[in-house]
Amino acid sequence: MFGLGKKKFTGIQIDHELVEEIEDIAKESYPIEFSAMLQGKVEKSVLKINGLIFLPGAASESGAVMEIFMMPMLSDAVGSVHSHPGYSAEPSGADLQFFAKRGYFHIIIAQPYNDDSIRAYNSFGELVDYTIV
Ligand SMILES: [Zn+2]
């Protein structure tokens, strides 16, 4: 059981169309990192991730995450997604600091930007299970 504010959930689901969108944007952005906030809600004890929130100026050649770090937390944002121009989806030190402060669920997608190169982390930087629905 996890907590998201006052709401509790036992599992995480990501909409498959959203996953495809994330993969497409990561490919198009390469070699630049893209980043966005993840939109979602808790329904029947499941955290359902179903949208992206793009923030102005969130794409840059370096420190993409640090730019959205400065933005106020949006009410239905539950976490973040960003791409890595490389084959490692391991969070960097800056990523971990960001995860700790902005939401519960964080996706990193590495090359080749497919379902198998996606890793999801909680706010402590620990790997989290999810299902694509
Ligand atoms: Zn990163």
Image: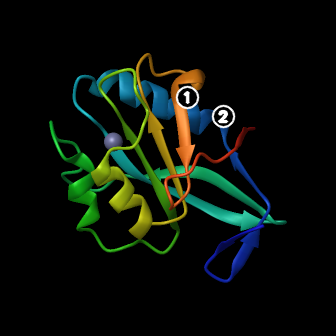
Residue type of the residue flagged with mark 1? Glu
Q: CA distance from mark 2 to mark 1?
A: 6 Å
For the view shown, which residue lies furthest in the top direction?
112
Q: Is residue 1 above or below residue 58?
A: below
> Left or right of 18: which side holds 73?
left
Determine whether the residue tagged by mark 1 lies in a helix, strand or loop: helix
Q: Is residue 10 above or below residue 107?
A: below
- Ligand 1 shows up in the quarter that is top left
- Front residue of 117/15: it is 117
> Left or right of 17: which side holds 30?
left
Residue at the image position 29 percent from the left and 25 percent from the top: 85
Residue at the image position 42 percent from the left and 27 percent from the top: 110
Residue 109, located in which quarter of the rendered image? top left
How packed mark 1 is, by other alpha carbons closer than 10 Å (few <14, some 14-19, many 20 or more), is some
Q: Is residue 70 above or below residue 119?
A: below
Residue at the image position 61 percent from the left and 80 percent from the top: 5
The numbered dot on residue 16 is 2
How packed mark 2 is, by other alpha carbons closer than 10 Å (few <14, some 14-19, many 20 or more), is some
Image x and y of residue 15, in percent: 66, 41
> Left or right of 33: which side holds 108?
right
Q: Are marks 2 and 1 in contact (CB under 8 Å)?
A: yes
Residue at the image position 57 percent from the left and 38 percent from the top: 18
Give the residue pinned by disc 1: 20
Image x and y of residue 36, in percent: 37, 50
Image x and y of residue 101, in percent: 40, 69
